[in-house]
């Protein structure tokens, strides 16, 4: 399979609502020697009582034996209508662990968790570890436990990007001669390499925005005077702007932005920022994304308590009120009277990146990153775009930018990152 075919396979599988045929095709091409002789489909009768609140039925598409003789099942777990992917992850993970233990003590599973009520689904790698332990009686028994590998999943489906999955699975799909080791499959679910890539791009984007702001301050007397009067530095401004945007990617992934009138929180589009930006540019080709879209969104919408309905006439949808400081103007600058015309191309453009990928702006880059879920956390945090990651990137990039500019040392990203963390905690409570 060549590179283009591998990219297409990932895109077809992971950017749409779940389809069994597409998922099977992905598994066959990923594992090469995939044994479908023991495939079966179960009904609710075969689901243990402990899991029936969350699991309606499940299917095994087949099994795989690695070169090291480790065994893996490929499963589809169909959740009940009442169960939610986000809230039932511990129960459904334990369901798979129980399956592996009772089915000849399999070593791992590739699982599609599918909810009938959602267009998104979860692609997970669950790995068991069997260890010999001495019991209190002195006898040696077998202890089973889930390894940390099981804690990472790809949230995929309609409205989700497949860039991360393409990055991680491309090499495995292209190798049609070698059967992959389970360690290689496990590595495809690791976020470390992708997180490092994201850190680099995040710092570059921060630097570009800061440079544009420095140029604007030198050129525009009104901006220069406002920043000086309110003690606003370009580094702090760029730092806060990046924190605001990255946090909104969390919120829109929750479906909390762009909710239609009368609809529930959580039903909004997962690409709200992209949609509202494209709609604006289509109607106002000469308009400015930051000045005309982002500032009103930040300071007139997210920072305004409009009651439970939270209806926003400007954007014609429900958008929640988020307090905590992140969506308050830095230094209380006059955002309505000061035109801060950051070039649109810093947010979205069509510059080529590599074959099949275009766009180097903030929204372009963020849109490409699918979010894997660290299920070890009490909250559903998605990497690489986590408050912790963004805080680290902001601190690193702001220090480097200050050093390059030979400017006086600026305060570290304390206020901005505190707001991000505080706002992240806020999202754990119902609106």
Image (cartoon, rainbow, N blue to C red):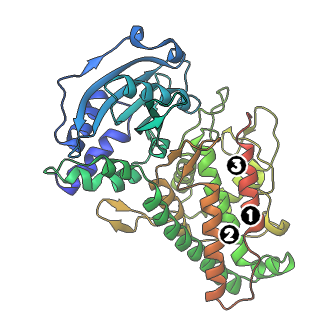
Residue 21: quadrant of the picture: top left
Mark before the other along the chain sequence, 1 or 3: 1
Q: Residue furthest front?
A: 138
Task: Identify whether 293 is placed above or below 342.
Answer: above
Q: Secondary structure at mark 2?
A: helix
Tell me how many marks there are.
3
In the picture of the structure, the residue carrying the numbered disc 2 is 239
The alpha-carbon separation of the residues under discs 2 and 1 comes to 7 Å
Q: Secondary structure at mark 3?
A: helix
The alpha-carbon separation of the residues under discs 2 and 3 comes to 17 Å
Q: Residue at x 44, y 25 (%)?
A: 98
Mark before the other along the chain sequence, 2 or 3: 2
Can see residue 340?
no
The alpha-carbon separation of the residues under discs 1 and 3 comes to 12 Å
Q: Residue at x 82, y 35 (%)?
A: 307
Mark 2 in CB contact with mark 1 (< 8 angstroms): yes
Q: In screen coordinates, is 92 left or right of 315?
A: left
Residue 57 in the image, given as x and y percentages of width and height: 40, 16
Task: Identify whether 80 is placed above or below 396.
Answer: above
Residue 106 in the image, given as x and y percentages of width and height: 33, 32
In the picture of the structure, the residue carrying the numbered disc 1 is 416
Local crowd at mark 3 within 10 Å, few (<14), some, or many (≥20)? some
Q: Residue at x 51, y 53 (%)?
A: 282
Between 272 and 154, the one lying in front of the other is 154
Residue 192 in the image, given as x and y percentages of width and height: 46, 59
Label disc, if present, on residue 424 of the rendered structure: 3
Between 107 and 117, the one lying in front of the other is 107
């Amino acid at each position: 399979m060549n590179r283009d075919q591998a990219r297409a396979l990932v895109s077809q599988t992971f950017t749409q609502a779940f389809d069994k045929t597409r998922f099977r095709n992905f598994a066959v091409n990923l594992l090469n020697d995939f044994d479908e002789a023991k495939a079966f489909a179960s009904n609710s009768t075969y689901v243990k009582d402990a899991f029936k609140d969350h699991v309606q039925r499940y299917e095994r598409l087949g099994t795989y034996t690695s070169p090291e003789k480790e065994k893996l099942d490929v499963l589809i777990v169909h959740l009940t209508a009442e169960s939610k992917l986000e809230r039932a992850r511990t129960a459904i993970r334990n369901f798979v662990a129980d399956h592996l233990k009772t089915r000849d003590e399999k070593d791992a599973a590739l699982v599609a968790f599918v909810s009938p009520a959602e267009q998104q689904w979860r692609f997970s790698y669950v790995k068991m570890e069997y260890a010999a332990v001495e019991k209190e009686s002195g006898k040696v028994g077998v202890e089973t436990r889930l390894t940390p590998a099981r804690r990472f999943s790809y949230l995929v489906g309609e409205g989700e990007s497949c860039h991360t999955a393409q990055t991680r699975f491309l090499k495995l799909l292209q190798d049609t001669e070698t059967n992959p080791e389970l360690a290689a499959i496990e590595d495809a679910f690791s976020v470390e390499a992708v997180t490092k890539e994201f850190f680099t791009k995040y710092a570059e984007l921060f630097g570009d925005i800061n440079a544009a702001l420095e140029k604007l301050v030198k050129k525009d007397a009104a901006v220069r005077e406002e920043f000086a009067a309110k003690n606003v530095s370009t580094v702090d401004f760029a730092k806060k702007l990046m924190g605001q945007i990255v946090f909104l990617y969390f919120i829109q992934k929750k479906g909390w932005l762009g909710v239609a009138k009368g609809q529930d929180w959580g039903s909004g589009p997962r690409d709200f920022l992209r949609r509202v930006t494209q709609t604006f540019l289509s109607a106002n080709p000469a308009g400015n994304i930051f000045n005309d879209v982002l500032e009103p969104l930040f300071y007139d919408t997210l920072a305004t308590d409009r009651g439970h309905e939270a209806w926003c006439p400007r954007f014609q949808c429900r958008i929640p009120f988020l307090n905590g400081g992140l969506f308050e103007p830095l230094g209380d600058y006059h955002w309505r009277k000061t035109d801060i015309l950051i070039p649109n191309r810093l947010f979205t453009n069509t510059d080529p990146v590599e074959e099949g990928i275009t766009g180097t702006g903030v929204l372009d880059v963020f849109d490409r990153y699918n979010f894997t879920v660290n299920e070890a956390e009490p909250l559903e945090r998605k990497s690489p775009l986590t408050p912790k990651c963004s805080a680290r990137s902001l601190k690193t990039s702001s220090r480097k930018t200050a050093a390059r500019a030979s400017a006086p040392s600026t305060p570290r990203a304390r206020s901005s990152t505190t707001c991000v963390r505080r706002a992240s905690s806020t999202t754990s409570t119902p609106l």
